[in-house]
Image (cartoon, helix red, strand yellow):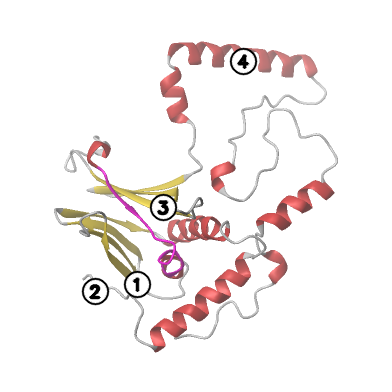
Amino acid sequence: MQADPFENSPRQNSFNNNYGRQQNINNTEQVPVAGYASEQPNNPLHRTRPHSQAHGHPHNNTQGQQSANMEMANNQHYQGQNQDNDSGNERDYTMFPVYSKRAALQFKLSETRKSQGRNFSFDTIMIEGAVRINPNDHNDKRYDWSKKLSVQIMLTELPVVIAVFLGITSSCQFMNHGQNKDKGFNFERQEDGLFASVFHKGGSMAVKMDWPTTLNIGHFMLAQYTSNFAGLGSDIILRNINRMCQDMIACNKFPVKTQQRK
């Protein structure tokens, strides 16, 4: 196990949700610019996509107003033609999709189920996989999401998965998910990227991610995991994850992927 990579990380740079929210209240006195959403908490579930805005020059208000009116008319016409397609084109800030030649995976914000006698849940991640309908047709980009495979990462599994995505450890594998205990997922860092798959008794869906995508999804998961612990910043949580991995490896309890993919 390597030395703690977060030993010298500055604590003031963490994305503590409560700290960021308080800082925004204290430091922001001006009214937000029209057309843009106000500052939101770090949890991607609560982010709002900014509305489009006409970019006229300050010295030409007439031209800017005409552009704004034209854009508004175009938007109204487009929305009137097909509102469903318009909403489908909005970026979904609550998930990260990854595509490959034969399959696709989606990493989505999720909540654990409220058990009997417990009126609360935890924020976690859901992985959804689908196969490509025509993998040999380069122009056909459709995936069969009607038969998607869904596996929710348990709260106890999420810090281990984050450790793999952020390079603290090399691989992990979790099984026995679902009502029939026949679903699972694994992640493995390889030389040219991260291999990810979800599987069940009938097969698997796998993708290969480049390193920037791996990092982005790792941060996405870390933000969701951090939202469960008010008052803790990401730097503290990463230190604790790193120490947890050291302890699990030392006692041979780390869920390393058993069969390395060639």
Tag 2: residue type? Gln
Q: Which of label 1 and label 4 is nearer to you?
A: 1
CB atoms of marks 1 and 3 within 8 Å: no
Q: Which of label 2 and label 4 is nearer to you?
A: 2
State the residue position of label 4: 72
What residue is at 80 percent from the left and 47 percent from the top? 25
**Residue 34, located in which quarter of the rendered image?**
top right
Element under label 2? loop
Tag 3: residue type? Gln
State the residue position of label 3: 116
Vertical position of residue 163 compared to residue 89: above or below: below
Tag 1: residue type? Ser
Element under label 3? loop
State the residue position of label 2: 260
Q: Which of label 1 and label 3 is nearer to you?
A: 3
Tag 4: residue type? Met
Vertical position of residue 136 compared to residue 188: above or below: above
Q: Which of label 3 and label 2 is nearer to you?
A: 3
Percent position of residue 63, x then y = 73, 16
**CA gap, disc 3 to disc 2?**
39 Å
Residue placed furthest toward the left: 202
What residue is at 19 percent from the left and 38 percent from the top? 133
Q: Which residues are magenta?
A: 148-160
Residue 171 is labelled as 1
Q: Earlier in the sequence, mark 1 or mark 3?
A: 3
Q: Which of label 3 and label 4 is nearer to you?
A: 3
For label 1, the crowd category at 10 Å Cα-Cα, with few meaning under 14, some 14 to 19 and many 20 or more, is: many
